[in-house]
Amino acid sequence: MSDPDPVRRVGGEMFAWSDWDPARGPRVPRGNTLFHLLSELASGSRTVLVAGPHEDEILTRLAARGAAVSCVVRSLADAERIAGAYPDVTVYCGSLGKIDQPDGFDLIVAADGMERLASAEGGQESPDDLLQSLTHLLSSRGVLALMHANICGVQHLVELEPGRHYRSDTAWYPVTEHDELRPASVPQLHDRLRAHGLDVSWDYAVFPTSHLPTVFVAHDIARDVDSPLRGPLGSVLFAALTEAYADTPVVRDPRAIMERAVRTGTAASLAPAWLTLARRADATGMAVPHHDLVVGGTDSFVYEFSVAGSDIRRSVLAPATGEDQSAGLRRVADPGSALHRAGRLFEDHLLQLCGRHDLVGLRAALGRYVAWVQEQSSDGAVAGAAALAGTYDLIFTETDFWPVPSRWAPVEPVPAGVVVARTLWGFAVRLITFNRPHPWHLTASAAELTAILAATAGQSLNQGDLDAAIDLEAGQRAADRDLPPERTAELRAALAGVRADTAGVDIQGYREMADALWRQEYQLQQMHALVAWTEKIIRDRDRALSALDQEVRLYQGTRTEKVFTFLKMAYRKLRFSAGRLKRKLRRNRRDATEMQ
């Protein structure tokens, strides 16, 4: 006889509540990258507890691996929904600490953190109490996968959320960032786990947000300023942050902050969250998969970069599911595995040359890039994802370039001239909107700066190639954001209109807006100075012409006219000298009065 109530109520259930309602609290974590990492930990002989609200896909992925899946949520409505959709999943509802499981669970997934494991119906458990409850439910050979939010993450430095502590319905308890029992750093989290009998097997810094984690980088890699993966890490973080904060007002563009963090080895300290894989100190025979850098998306392929000696190995962990086309682009299902030479991000190399005003170096670097595009082309056109590789997608080695995998590729080959124009145009836009130093005129528009970069590379840029390049860029951004045609047209117009006073076209940063206002004021000052200089030149020219005219009259006139002209010139000279003397005496008298 089946149980009439498929939900196991353990006490502390919340009735008129749902943690899946975005109006009441943060969104639940999701994404193919997270799903893959968690499914790697499951196997047919394991029992799994999903603690807290998670995307339903996690339950599906874990069950597909043959694991016996259970979950615990505090909302009764959420528990009933999950029990109805997943009859094979054991659903607990209530407080985490009230679950009775004598044998424990082989895998506990808490990718949403510990904040939503505590129920409002009862005593408020501290973060340390919740961590102890998670540890208590872990079997002797179990693994805990815990996502812990960083109170000093990049999101707290850039996001604009007025009244965020008061608007959320989840704020029935004080903000816990000042709680001494809440781990505030990775070392503190490790210390708390060890205090509860766990050893950390591996941990990741999670980007770009805790609810949409698409980039997982091992802490050792994130801290190593000399790591061969520094170039790919900078590239994937730039793309992930662009997607996460697109069309979002922020204090400052987070990409500029993370760019410096990667260079200084502090990216892990600014990560929005950390994923820690811990197991009991005496556990044996339970292998925990390790990765250096794992990248994916919400519905795209998942791949990893790993260090292979002095080279970089790229391996595909999971292909994309389904085919999709948008704006002349097709979704890449599998970029393939490869072994690459370690190198530097091409954008970083160009920015260094621009900052040093090294035109010779820029000519050589851009010329090498143009030659690489020609090598990738066939009959003057580039096919595949290489056609969309910009300066932030290319790793620059001593002998070659190689692109970081792209989620999109053009359906039809793109002319090589358009590929070069798009890359140079994108670099020109970032030089302007990021207020980067460069050797050319500060007031140049993106189109003008692109033409200058093309000339530096030894290429001629025509308007047709530039228009096609902007169309291609607008199509890729529209595909990433799934924009309707009218929004795509607006985006295309914004991209084509980037000028010196443009703050940005994807992320709306207030600092970038202030920089754009400064550039606009700089332009006005230059215009005023140019007008004043022009007026002075005109006055000097008129004075010189008048003097020449008088001199001509002096030589061509009669004797009487010559005498009259000479006396007139002498009178003007004496009048001018007397005026200067008068002003000097008045100034001296005023100075003497002030001294008294």
Image (cartoon, grey):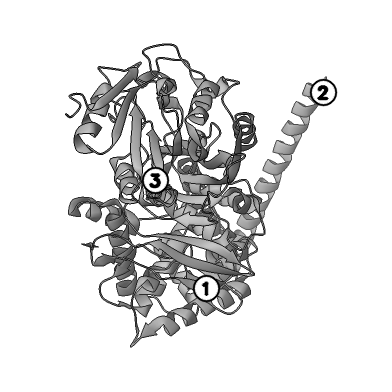
Asked whether, in this view, residue 77 is left or right of residue 477, the answer is left
* Residue at 38 percent of width and 48 percent of height: 35
First-in-chain label (1 vs 2): 1
Disc 3 residue type (three-letter): Ala
| Mark 1 secondary-structure assignment | strand
Q: Position of residue 337 (x, y in %)?
A: 44, 70
Asked whether, in this view, residue 404 is left or right of residue 474, the answer is right
* Residue at 82 percent of width and 23 percent of height: 595
| Mark 2 secondary-structure assignment | helix
Of residues 546 and 497, the one nearer the viewer is 497
First-in-chain label (1 vs 3): 3
Which quadrant is the N terminus positioned in? top left
* Residue at 38 percent of width and 55 percent of height: 498
Q: Calculate the distance from the C-alpha at mark 3 to the C-alpha at mark 2.
A: 66 Å
Q: Nearer the viewer, mark 1 or mark 2?
A: 1
Q: Calculate the distance from the C-alpha at mark 1 to the C-alpha at mark 3.
A: 29 Å
Label 2: how many Cα within 10 Å (few below 14, some 14–19, many 20+): few
Which quadrant is the C terminus positioned in? top right
Q: Position of residue 580 (x, y in %)?
A: 70, 43
* Residue at 20 percent of width and 51 percent of height: 484
- The outermost residue toward the front is 1
Asked whether, in this view, residue 420 is left or right of residue 9, the answer is right
Residue occupied by mark 2: 595
Label 1–label 3 contact, CB within 8 A: no
Disc 2 residue type (three-letter): Met
Label 1: how many Cα within 10 Å (few below 14, some 14–19, many 20+): some
Disc 1 residue type (three-letter): Leu
- On the question of residue 27 being in view, the answer is no
First-in-chain label (3 vs 2): 3
- Residue 244's tag is 3
Residue occupied by mark 1: 339
